Image (cartoon, helix red, strand yellow):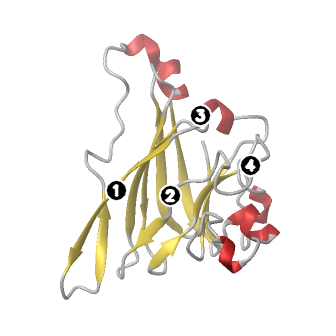
Amino acid sequence: MPRIRTTVVVLAALGLGGATVAFGGSERLEPTAGHGHGDHQGRQGRHASAALVNAAGDRVGRVRMHEGRRDGVVHLRVRVRDLPPGFHGFHVHTTGRCDAPGFTTAGGHLNPAGTSHAAHAGDLPSLLVNDDGRARLAATTDRFSLGDLRDADGSAVMVHSGPDNFANIPARYGTPDQETLDTGDSGSRIACGVVR
């Protein structure tokens, strides 16, 4: 069973009407220690990023990825701004296209195994955007490699308008419908970034 580990620190401040989501470490992702200047191509292959834009084409954030040389685990660091407060579904989608306004050209969630949400390779932890429109997130996953994201048609990262329920519908509420199984009911697509 693939594992996904999330490192998120939530600091709630009384009277500020929100929480700050932060992660440890610096924003800059360093190459693995011990690799000299001759490993330029290798370092490029182990790093990727995506500039997130909204439907108007304004840049609203960045996703940085680093793939561990030894274990192949992908570490993601996300920063966003100017987004509506609250939880937002956050996923990797199958195609490296972000055509506004609906970003539907990015396809569905990265899901080579044909599973239901939240077992898609591209399913990631939700973003918690504060009242000031900003969020940070750090996550680690072994569900995909950067090579998977750089296939023939590329891939994109997506922020959705609503919270992701990860298809967690208790049996007492009935059977999850297809939209829940496909997307976790996270709503429309509000920001998209092509993985480069």
Foreground disc of the pair 2, 4: 2
Q: Is residue 8 visible?
A: yes
Asked whether disc 2 touches disc 1, contact meaning CB atoms under 8 Å apart, the reply is yes
Q: Residue at x 19, y 88 (%)?
A: 15
* Residue 76 as seen in the image, left or right of residue 13: right
Q: Amino acid at mark 3?
A: Leu
Mark 4 Cα shell of 10 Å, populated few (<14), some (14-19), many (≥20):
many
* Tag of residue 146: 3
* Residue 129 as seen in the image, left or right of residue 169: left
Q: Residue at x 36, y 13 (%)?
A: 36
Q: Provide the secondary structure element on which disc 4 rests.
A: loop
In percent of width and height, residue 174 lies at 74, 76
Q: Is residue 103 visible?
A: no
What residue sits right under mark 2 in the picture?
125
Instruction: Determine the CA span between mark 2 and mark 1.
Output: 10 Å
The quadrant of the picture occupied by the C terminus is top right
Mark before the other along the chain sequence, 4 or 1: 1
Q: Amino acid at mark 4?
A: Thr
Q: Residue at x 77, y 72 (%)?
A: 175
Mark 2 Cα shell of 10 Å, populated few (<14), some (14-19), many (≥20):
many
In percent of width and height, residue 115 lies at 75, 48
* Tag of residue 94: 4
Instruction: Determine the CA span between mark 1 and mark 3.
Output: 22 Å
What residue sits right under mark 1 in the picture?
8
Q: Amino acid at mark 2?
A: Pro
